[in-house]
Image (cartoon, coloured by chain):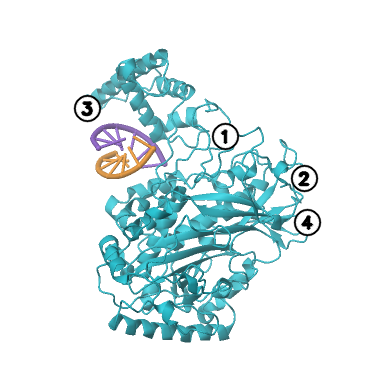
Chain colours: A cyan, B purple, C orange
Amino acid sequence: MVLKRRLDYEFNGYEFPPVPRAARSARRRVPFKKRFQENQMCAFDLLAVVAGKLLLEKDTALESSNIEPIDESSVNKVREIEGENSEAKVHDQGSPARSVFVSELLHVVPEEDHCHKEPLCCENDNNAGLLSPAATSGCKEKFYGDKVVNREIKNAIGTFSPSKVDVGFSGNFDDSIDTKVDVKVEHDLKDESYKSEKLENETAGGMFSSDSTLCADHIPHCFNPANEDVVNIVSSRDDDENSSGCTQPSTMKRFFRQTSRIGDRRIKKILASRCWKVASRLKDASFSNRQGDLKPFYHTGKNYKLDRSERLYPIKKRRRFSSSSPSNSGGMIYTDLAQKGCNGDGSANGSLESSSNAGKQGSFQPRDSQVKLRIKSFRVPELFIEIPETATIGSLKRTVVDAFTAILGGGVRVGVLLHGRKVREDHKTLLQTGISHSNHSDALSFSLEPNPLRSNGSVCSGDLNSAVSYQTPQPLSRYPHTPSTVHQSTGAASPEPQTVILGNLVESDHDSAPSPTDNIIAGISSDLKDMLAVPAMNAAAGSLAVVSANRKSKRAEMAQRRIRRPFSVSEVEALVQAVEQLGTGRWRDVKVRAFDHAKHRTYVDLKDKWKTLVHTARISPQQRRGEAVPQELLDRVLTAHAYWSHQQQLNQQQLSDSCTFPAPLLAMP
DNA sequence: ATTAGGG
DNA sequence: CCCTAAT
């Protein structure tokens, strides 16, 4: 195997590490209002995080013999393996978020089979500002259309930035609805090319590695006239106005455009000029007949002429999530062929590698052969977004984020394909299926599929908005297994990977050997929000932040609620014991003492649990719910609670009485 | 970052 | 479990 560089991932019981407490806490110090605004993060951020998580975190797995759950510190490290010699180096790249970039916003025709995208330039440069998460730390990077202005950030971005994110959006901007957003996260193997490029891109306007795929690779599909429908534009307009709340008069749309590196000046020029055209056209459109001018801009490389038919492109005609055929509509994750980041194929926007685990010298103890997989990139299949054309890029991003977040929260499931054929037998082992460490990359691929939450029929114009939020109803808390407590850890229990699976990814019954595919997608925890919170983009964005997306997706803005994990009896016991000894005011200590290993139990959780325990102990057994806690424990709870309450009182008394020394902290007898 | 308390 | 406020 002659991989130049390889990142090995194992998707075996992988769990996204929780957001560091610090981060969360820090967030909490920010006043709620402000935080809310800040949470209007941009797609960039979210994608960065997601991609960062997906692509980077896993790496540390090969470091140790993966007995240990990934610890948080590993988030920032990437291990690169050079060729056979396994000469590994670890880069600290700061937040994984920094390693992904929004390379481009592409304007796409919303037609089913349209993959043509027309890059748009932004009318207002200021609008194009992007703040990376790095901004949090005082660094700012701004992308101005073709220009990338980089200050102080040079290194702040991180040493490892082989990734890029393509955000394309398409739609009818005249009515500012029916906007489709393609999100593509691509992991680029060639990071040093990135670096060098980055420096030169003040002029080059690109900032991504040489094999970046720009629009060209989205082109393959062709326009399909069959898709045209005669549509009642007016009515849908009404719908839209009602539902999407895009009441603002359509002024000039602003679009952010970032020519992705493309290294080719010529192309860049073309694009630029084209952008200009588009822009002016749009302008015209907005002044003349807004209704008819649904300008689907696309570029096939030379031909931008707009068909009449296209112009009449029906607002109505929108793909339904469910109707997306996994076959051709994005959302595929390909196993890769380790040669190059991109294969120029537009649809190949995801890749994943199953390597013949070269370096895994017996490091895997338990099972014989482990299959190593790497998700090189992925793409969110169908994301529908409606947004007023008067919206700013910032709001668009936010909208994308919302939708994306929501999707991650359960709207997506994963399919496994072997040799292009779908493997539906969830219960089969990898081996049975024919996936082994010895078979090669391209055989295996994954697909992201929308969860068929709703039937096609239900999607009517009035439903458009729900399109955006269609994912929301699906709570993240999909537990593949009964959340029951078979292996709820007690005191020192094993750090079992609490994998949260998105969508109904897995229903399989598990034998002792969990199949990697079962765990490929770990939970994107509720912390996304916290992770992503970033100072509001820019003034421009601010203005339309109001206009921004739908109230509907309000929920999406919120971080996912953490999954519910009822305390097991043993946990309760541990808690009780700890509190007995430490008292009720030292939850941090309690945590360390009794739940140090349980990442998902924060001291706040413990405190809360104690609260409910006290309550539970006081109510009649009939009123209690959930797993019954032994009366004996509850008694101890009451006792301890009484004792420590008393102690507290004493302490306070002493404190106020005089300046005596605080009473020594003694464990209750 | 922790703690306390309301929801 | 989440959210806030106050330490």
Q: What chain does badge 2 belong to? A: A
Identity of the residue drawn at 66% across and 32% down: A512
Tell me the tag on residue A656: 3
Tell me the tag on residue A496: 1
Q: Residues at badges 1 and 4 in contact (C-beta under 8 Å)? A: no
- As shown in the figure, which amino acid type bears the numbered disc 1? Glu
Label 1 and label 4: CA atoms lie apart by: 33 Å
Quarter of the image for the C terminus of chain A: give it: top left
Callout 3 secondary element: helix
Q: What chain does badge 4 belong to? A: A
The mark closer to the camera, 3 or 1, is 1
Q: Nearer the viewer, residue A17 or A568?
A: A568
Task: Specify which label sits upstream in the sequence, 3 or 1.
Answer: 1
Direction from residue A200 to residue A281 in the image, left or right: left
The mark closer to the camera, 2 or 4, is 2
Label 2 and label 4: CA atoms lie apart by: 13 Å
- As shown in the figure, which amino acid type bears the numbered disc 4? Asn
Query: x, y percentage for residue A661?
Result: 31, 25
The mark closer to the camera, 3 or 4, is 4
Q: Which residue is mark 4?
A: A85
Label 2 and label 3: CA atoms lie apart by: 65 Å
Q: Nearer the viewer, residue A635 or A410?
A: A410
Q: Is residue A307 above or below residue A579?
A: below
Query: x, y percentage for residue A290?
Result: 30, 78
Task: Specify which label sits upstream in the sequence, 2 or 4.
Answer: 4
Q: Residues at badges 3 and 4 in contact (C-beta under 8 Å)? A: no
Task: Specify which label sits upstream in the sequence, 2 or 3.
Answer: 2
Direction from residue A429 to residue A596 in the image, left or right: left
Asked whether the residues under marks 1 and 4 belong to the same chain, the reply is: yes
